[in-house]
Image: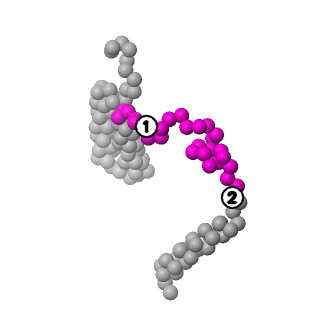
């Protein structure tokens, strides 16, 4: 019997055994605050499906873009002594392009959540 076949058969059996043991041995004493929507004891203040401003989604997308910058810079930082000067300048060009993009989004007001009272 190969290892893969063993795991394909063993994992579902183990899962079922653990679920049955949990149902038989676990203590289940629910009370009103435990089964409430929030375990903190506070009643909900509003609907969970309220509308969010598009600004939150825009900032989330921009965060992902600039977070991926770190992902691309990590391999360069690890192999810094092994890359040539051309590799160094490629990373510098990459950072310049990202900086231009950041300045552009800042100038368009993509990071502003509130209106400036002087612009009213």
Residue 15 pos. (x, y %) = 57, 71
- Can the viewer see residue 11? yes
Relative to 102, is 4 above or below?
below
In the figure, residue 100 lies in which quadrant? Answer: top left
Indicate left or right for 79 with 44 as reference: left
Q: How far apart are the alpha carbons under marks 1 and 2?
A: 33 Å
Residue drawn 36% across and 12% down? 118
Relative to 6, is 99 above or below?
above
Residue 106 pos. (x, y %) = 33, 28
Residue furthest front in the image: 32
Residue 23 pos. (x, y %) = 65, 66
In magenta, the rendered stretch is 29-55
User: Callout 2: 10 Å neighbours few (<14), some, many (20+)?
Assistant: few
Indicate left or right for 29 with 10 as reference: right
Q: Which residue is mark 2?
A: 28
Residue furthest bottom in the image: 1
Question: Considering depth in this image, is 82 or 110 the residue closer to the camera?
Answer: 110
Label 1: which secondary element? loop
The mark total stands at 2
Numbered badge on residue 50: 1
Label 2: which secondary element? loop
Indicate left or right for 12 with 119 as reference: right
């Amino acid at each position: 019997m190969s290892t893969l076949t063993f795991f394909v058969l063993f994992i579902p059996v183990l899962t079922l055994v653990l679920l049955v043991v949990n149902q038989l041995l676990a203590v289940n004493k629910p009370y009103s605050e435990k089964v409430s929507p929030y375990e903190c004891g506070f009643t909900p203040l509003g609907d969970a499906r309220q509308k969010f401003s598009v600004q939150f989604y825009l900032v989330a997308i921009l965060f992902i873009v600039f977070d991926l910058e770190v992902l691309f810079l990590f391999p360069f930082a690890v192999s810094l002594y092994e890359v040539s000067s051309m590799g160094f300048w490629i990373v510098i060009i990459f950072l310049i392009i990202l900086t231009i993009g950041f300045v552009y989004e800042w100038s368009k007001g993509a990071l502003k959540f509130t209106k400036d009272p002087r612009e009213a």
